[in-house]
Amino acid sequence: MNEHAEPQERGQQKRPEMRVRPTAPIVPPSNVSGNALMCVIAIMAFLACLTFGAVSMVRATAASWQSEISRELTIQIKPDDNLDMEAALNDARDLALTFAGTRDGQIIDREATARLLEPWLGEGLDLDELPVPRLVVVTIDERNPPDFAAMRQALAEKIPQAFLDDHRTWVNRLVAMAETTALIGTGVLILVFSAMVLTVVFATRGALSGNRHIIEVLHFVGAEAGFVATEFQKHFLKISLKGSFAGGTLAALVFAIAGYWQGRSLATPQSDQATALFGTFSVGAGGYLGIAATMIVIALLTTLTARFTVMRTIFEIDRIRSDPARTDGLPET
Amino acid sequence: MGLDFVPSASLPEKVRGTRIDENRIAPLIHFENVGLRYGMGPEVLRDLTFDIPRRSFQFLTGPSGAGKSTLLRLLFLSLQPTRGLIRTFDRNIATIPREELPMLRRRIGIVFQDFRLLEHLTTYENVALPLRVRGKDELSYRADVIDLLKWVGLGERINVLPPVLSGGEKQRAAIARALIDRPELLLADEPTGNVDPPMARRLLSLFLELNRLGTAVVIATHDLSLMDQVDARRMILSQGRLDIYE
């Protein structure tokens, strides 16, 4: 042995000092399960952000349907032999505008009325030959609407042939529909977020199960539970940030591209149809903030799951210590 | 004894440093009427009463299934007995809170039968792991780790990953990891189980050198030829009972 040692020592004098590589992280930076987890997180982040954006878009569209129709009221005046229709229309408009909460009044003229009836009665309609009611459309302040009952009463007194339609029936139906749509959207969002939470939690636990031997070794060389948990937490935070950033960014890009396409193809049949159905593909600052919040939630969720799982693993190792009945699977003695 | 291997240099100073109070006579570990059973099964270990004195060297042997690994687990605080008393470093292990276990384990070095080296870390990083988990600055221990690796004959394998190491090299890396923080007690489970006889003799000489420097050593082994090389205390487990031959 000494014979062996001497040449070694002589050799060491000639050789430069041994260098060591920069210290590697205690948890392996990348492996198959880590990469798979990153993909799962990216996909779930993408789906969750997409759902979040879509639901906020649907809610905005439903709200706009509701507000557009409740922004107006209509006064309908039925023809009568003793009634000067043009004067009655003017009176009705003027009367309506005397009420607080009204903004503007517009009489639907004869040509416009003919156009409205054109789908049913055809072209070349002479309004004088038919007892067609005429309309006055009054724009109102939806936040501070006029007193409909008082207006209806005043109109009935001044022009008995006038009928006030405050669209309440339609508004109520649309409110119900919009609320249902928003509710369904929220339900879908909750389902997708629940699926995301469960998927991320189980995928993180799965990725960690492949590292149980590292937890054991660290524990047995004297590492405190908090130290081990922090090492894994850092590792999984990096993975989840990469995954959720990729998924969230992709979802934001989808909305940005869809919005850009819609802006570029304004007034085309495809765009108009899409706009009618889905509203504008703009999720707004709130939507993008929501996407960012989703990314942060996923990152936190993964990190906390990692910490909790590591602490639990150590707890189980220690529980085996205090309860030998749980040592099934230990090496044979 | 025919030992042909002595470490290439004396044990590095930091590892060698004596911290055992010679005036203290309490054993490192004391077992009294210890018994252990798994669940409702029969007792795997029965009525064990013995001490592991400071600076002692002993072999733990017995047939397969006799309970050697279980006894090592009891010594390493990774199991509690179902009856009896174990005092480790003057503490009754039944009353030690979970949070204090890492601190006590730091005073015990263990060499697992399957080495348990982390495969993504180099030999150097594996050996330095106990110091790293204690939060020490790498600059404060780098030279000590390299010295120890040279001492166990792995000076040229510092930057090598475990899959590239031979069985004997892995074993020595595992031993170095167990020694790096100067444990008061070293437990080794079948440390020569995966190596040829010359390497087994080399490893034994490492343990003897370590013991000479003050660490109590317990080697669990089946290898009679290995035990015949050293006149040391033998603890023989048979059917859960322990006989000790001084």
Image: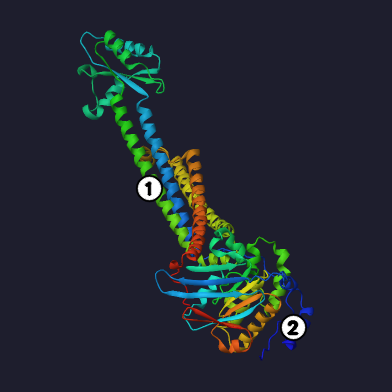
The numbered mark at residue A25 is none
A331 versus A201 height, above or below: below
Residue found at the very far bottom of the displayed protein: B2
Q: Is residue A162 left or right of residue A25?
A: left
- The percent coordinates of residue B65 (x first, y second) are 46, 80
Expressed as whole percent of the image width and height from the top left, the position of residue A248 reads 49, 49
Q: Amino acid at mark 2?
A: Gln
Find residue A8 and name its label: 2
The structure residue drawn at horizontal position 39% and vertical position 45%, both measured from the top left corner, is A190
Dot 2: element: helix
Give amino acid for label 1.
Leu
Chain of the residue under the numbered disc 1 shown in the image: A
Mark earlier in primary sequence (2, 1): 2
Q: Is residue A210 visible?
A: no
Image depth: mark 2 or mark 1 in front? 2
**Pointer 1: what residue?**
A191
| Tags 2 and 1 touching, CB below 8 Å | no
